[in-house]
Image (cartoon, rainbow, N blue to C red):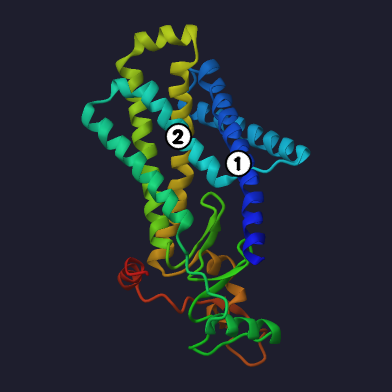
Amino acid sequence: MVLQLHDQRKMLAWPKLIGRCTISCISVLLTQFALVLVPLFFSASPILVQLTLSVLVLLVVVGFGGWCRRLLGFHASAPAFVFFSIFFLWGVYIAIIRQAISRFMDIVFNGEMIMLIIGLCRIMLKDPGFVAQGSNYSDELDESSVLGIQMHNEGSLLQRRVRYCKSCKKYVHGFDHHCPAFGNCIGQKNYALFVLLLVGFITTETFYIVFSFQFASKFPVLEEIRLQTNYISVMARSTSLFSLLQVLWQGLFLMWHVHCICFNIRTEEWVNWKKYPEFQINASSLPGDCHEIRFKNPYNKGILENVKEFLTLK
């Protein structure tokens, strides 16, 4: 009976998943074709102006798309959006940009794309470090939650860096954040993979931008003719703008995580440090002074040791 109920739920989940993937695919197409308007009408403008206009177009499309989905009761899938965006860029590369690239660099870029897709599949399916139900950790957490106890001793779960993810509704070892784009928590077991994947995205998108400019410089006459007749070559420019925007925010995101690695702290701990007693220190100098709580990171062992610990995460 239980197995039949489980099978029925899986059968009901498939149409919902297909529907969300379809909405995500449509969203990617609308976003990319909307971005075509920027190089189509503002090709002579400086790159900074085109980037600013691209941001405005993305905000309008995302905002309007979100409003339409809420109005119609549809839902999209963020991981599916990421996958379809990758395949769209890859398709534009193969159809347009590839002809201007050397054979060796073409092999390198296609290899990067394949590795990126494999990495995405792995991080979506990999256990980030969930605390299993029925384990000693889970029992201790349930007991402390019911009694409202904040545990301060060195052997407590807080010192083991087990945090709660509201999205997954699970406890996670070394919880950093919940990543909607990958549809999974980022924790102790997949943090290194997450950072590696972030580097992979930046590297691949940087290659794509360089190849796009290489295409424009090698075929200026061909591109000018195409601009007057269709949107094919304009697509190469618009997707390079999209990639450049991705590189900018992902670069900042990577810098933040490098900082976290160097100082051995997680995003969740930095944002909500007042929730965790081990990060709090009483800075009052006199007994009569008001209690002033300051931040102190008990896990910081020095940059070299922190990086070594990150590289040995399991």
Residue 70 visible to the viewer: yes
Question: Residue flagged by tag 1: what amino acid is it?
Answer: Ile
Q: Residues within 10 Å of mark 2 (few under 14, many from 20)?
A: some
Q: Which residue is mark 1?
A: 18
Q: Which residue is mark 2?
A: 87
**Residue 117 sits in quarter:** top left
**Left or right placement of residue 171 versus residue 239 in this view:** right
Question: Residue flagged by tag 2: what amino acid is it?
Answer: Phe
Q: Specify the quadrant that holds the C terminus.
A: bottom left
Measured along the vertical axis of the image, is residue 101 above or below residue 109?
above
The circle on residue 85 is none
| Horizontal and vertical percent position of residue 256 | 45, 57
Determine whether label 2 and label 1 are within 8 Å by CB.
Answer: no
State the residue lying farthest toward the left. Answer: 104
**Left or right placement of residue 214 versus residue 249 in this view:** left
Which type of secondary structure does the marked residue at label 1 adopt? helix
| Horizontal and vertical percent position of residue 214 | 31, 24
Nearer to the camera, 42 or 113: 113
Mark closer to the observer (2, 1): 1
Q: Residues within 10 Å of mark 1 (few under 14, many from 20)?
A: few
Residue 157 visible to the viewer: no
Which type of secondary structure does the marked residue at label 2 adopt? helix
Q: How many marks?
A: 2
Residue at 54% across / 53% down in the picture? 183
Measured along the vertical axis of the image, is residue 14 above or below residue 39?
below
Q: Work out how far the residue at label 2 is from the one at label 1, CA to CA, in angstroms.
A: 17 Å
Q: Which one is earlier in the sequence, the residue at label 2 or at label 1?
A: 1
